[in-house]
């Protein structure tokens, strides 16, 4: 069986903790006055849009009905789309279609909490029980939640052990936060709190509980007031527990575990099993705007952005901050954002350190490991540009920064 989960697995659970701050690296180099493409810093390779498109067609070849991407590069927009957004009508997917972002929601929840830190309402290093008395193991701090170091068991492992029956069992269910936390607390901690990265949706369900406890409002209200309205995100919604998607959306198609079984239209669901860990609906434009604004310091103080960028190692080329992923690309550039999986949708959304170049790539299928592993190739294409020519052909060519940082690493 293919696992469609992002960032999970025993190998990741054993990563030894050491917090690192990665040196400043950027696809966009110095801030660009006026923000036009003409002002590109000289060492920034142009996005390889042919290769971004090849990533989308590869997703289709491996079973996705449709795939889309949007690159925002210093004010220039590139929209790419392949395949269909609705298999019943044959409607072509577009890069403006809304979709379920899955765990990209975690970045929204982290931003709300870091704003509350800025407002003096929350201490990252306080035990969660300070705010939610008696809820968790006393050792678990807010920072542990947001960096996936609490050790709280991920209840979705059991919920979706059988993909389609698991999904159908929760498609229309409405869970309270406490019910989801109780599913987790029925199992022992996976790691000692604070000791290692161990990805778990439970962490961001508790983040939602914190948001609601500290503000007295629903996470919906807080996303809207603090992020959606502030950035003018016209395609971003939190409709839990409603099941319908707002107009102009791509339908999502879940792949069953059984080989050859037809895709399941999974568009309509409450996503109550994820809520503040995964229930946001958005678009490529809005996610690019969101991560760009975040990295440019428009959503939190510089001090809290710095906290978000304290990295727990995930593997050799990835770190997890506070609700934020870092990926180190083959050309030596690091990019910042999040990935998301929800039934019928895979999302990859990242921006450069200066927030001037962003890409969101989406496929409208899930439980398909090949498609999942294909999408990150769009990051290489968007931020590293065209692969270096063969050594013999470039002997007289000037050496580009992206070639000499990692000359031996193949870019597939
Ligand atoms: C849950 C399983 C994915 C999805 C998940 N998503 O935890 C959160 C995230 C919000 O981290 C499902 N896979 C699929 C299975 C595997 O059911 N048996 O691929 O749609 O993004």
Image (spheres, rainbow, N blue to C red):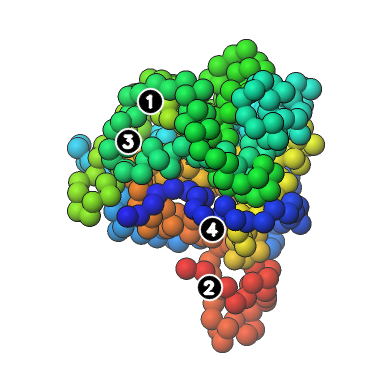
Is tag 4's residue or tag 1's residue first in the polypeptide sequence?
Answer: 4
Disc 2 to disc 3, C-alpha distance: 38 Å
Is tag 2's residue or tag 3's residue first in the polypeptide sequence?
Answer: 3
* Foreground label between 2 and 4: 4
* Foreground label between 2 and 3: 3
* Foreground label between 4 and 1: 4
Vertical relation: 357 (above or below) 44: above
Q: Which residue corresponds to the image point at 51% horizontal and 22% vertical from the top-left?
A: 178
| Numbered tag placed on residue 280 in the rendering | none
- SS under mark 1: loop
x then y, percent, for residue 216 = 62, 12
- SS under mark 3: helix
Which residue is at the far top? Answer: 216
Q: Is residue 10 left or right of residue 15?
A: left
* Foreground label between 2 and 1: 1
Disc 3 to disc 4, C-alpha distance: 25 Å
- SS under mark 2: loop
x then y, percent, for residue 111 = 65, 31
| Numbered tag placed on residue 270 in the rendering | 1
Q: Which residue is mark 3?
A: 167
């Amino acid at each position: 069986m293919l696992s469609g989960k992002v960032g999970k697995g025993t190998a990741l659970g054993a990563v030894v903790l050491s917090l690192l701050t990665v040196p400043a690296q950027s696809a966009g180099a110095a801030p660009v006055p006026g923000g036009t493409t003409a002002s590109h810093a000289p060492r920034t390779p142009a996005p390889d849009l042919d290769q971004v498109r090849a990533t989308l067609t590869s997703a289709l070849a491996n079973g996705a009905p449709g795939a889309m991407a949007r690159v925002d590069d210093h004010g220039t927009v590139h929209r790419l789309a392949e395949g269909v957004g609705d298999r019943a009508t044959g409607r072509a997917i577009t890069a403006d279609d809304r979709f379920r972002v899955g765990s990209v929601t975690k970045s929204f929840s982290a931003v709300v909490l870091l704003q509350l830190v800025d407002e003096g309402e929350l201490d990252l290093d306080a035990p969660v029980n300070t705010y939610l008395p008696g809820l968790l193991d006393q050792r678990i701090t807010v920072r542990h939640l947001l960096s996936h170091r609490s050790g709280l068991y991920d209840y979705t492992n059991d919920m979706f052990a059988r993909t389609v029956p698991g999904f159908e069992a929760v498609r229309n269910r409405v869970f309270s936060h406490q019910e989801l936390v109780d599913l987790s607390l029925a199992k022992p901690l996976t790691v000692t709190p604070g000791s290692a990265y161990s990805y778990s949706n439970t962490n961001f369900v508790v983040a939602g509980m914190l948001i609601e406890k500290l503000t007295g409002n629903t996470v919906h209200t807080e996303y809207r007031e603090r992020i959606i309205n502030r950035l003018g995100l016209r395609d971003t919604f939190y409709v839990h527990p409603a099941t319908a998607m707002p107009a102009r959306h791509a339908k999502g198609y879940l792949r069953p575990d059984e080989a050859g079984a037809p895709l399941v239209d999974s568009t309509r669901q409450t996503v109550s099993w994820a809520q503040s860990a995964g229930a946001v609906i958005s678009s490529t434009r809005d996610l690019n705007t969101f991560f760009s604004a975040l990295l440019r310091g428009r959503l939190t103080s510089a001090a809290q952005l710095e906290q978000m960028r304290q990295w727990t190692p995930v593997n050799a080329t990835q770190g997890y901050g506070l609700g934020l992923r870092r990926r180190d690309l083959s050309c030596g550039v690091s990019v910042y954002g999040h990935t998301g999986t929800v039934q019928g949708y895979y999302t990859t959304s990242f921006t450069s350190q200066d927030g001037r170049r962003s890409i969101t790539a989406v496929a409208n299928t899930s439980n398909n490991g090949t498609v999942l592993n294909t999408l990150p190739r769009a990051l290489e294409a968007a931020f590293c540009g065209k692969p270096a020519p063969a050594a013999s052909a470039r002997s007289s060519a000037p050496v580009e920064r992206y070639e000499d940082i990692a000359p031996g690493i193949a870019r597939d």
